[in-house]
Amino acid sequence: MSQSASASPNNYVRENKETLVEIIKHGDDEFVRAMALAALVEFGDDPDLNTLRRELERMTERGGQ
């Protein structure tokens, strides 16, 4: 794999989706959470957006915790 392919934002998000979701769900820093969300929205697949939307709805229902 070339360095440009491994550095691709699409590849990064695909390979680290679970970590990004965990950051959004449990991160303490709002800026870092926003960056993880932005990466998923910008470079994630459409099914990822649906999963993320459900997770955000669950967080909202629980009062953001």
Image (spheres, rainbow, N blue to C red):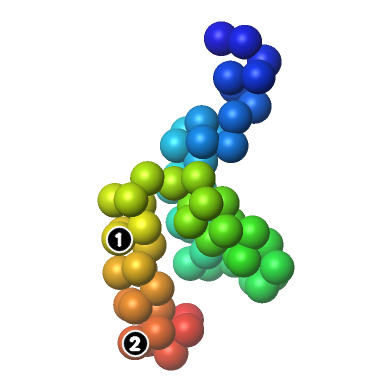
Residue 44 position in % (x across, y down) = 44, 46
Question: Can residue 52 be seen from the camera position used here?
Answer: yes
Question: Can residue 16 be seen from the camera position used here?
Answer: no
Tell me the residue at 62%/10% (across/down): 2
Residue 60 position in % (x across, y down) = 40, 84
Q: Secondary structure at mark 1?
A: helix
Q: Amino acid at mark 2?
A: Glu
Q: Quadrant of the N terminus?
A: top right
Give the CA separation, mark 1 to mark 2: 17 Å
Residue 29 position in % (x across, y down) = 69, 70
Is 6 or 58 nearer to us in this picture?
6
Left or right: residue 15 compared with residue 58: right
Tell me the residue at 57%/58% (across/down): 38
Which numbered disc, 1 or 2, marks the residue that appears first in the sequence?
1
Residue located farthest toward the top when viewing the structure as drawn: 1
Q: Amino acid at mark 1?
A: Asn
Q: Quadrant of residue 59?
A: bottom left
User: What numbered label is drawn on residue 50?
Assistant: 1
Q: Which residue is mark 2?
A: 61
Left or right: residue 19 compared with residue 50: right
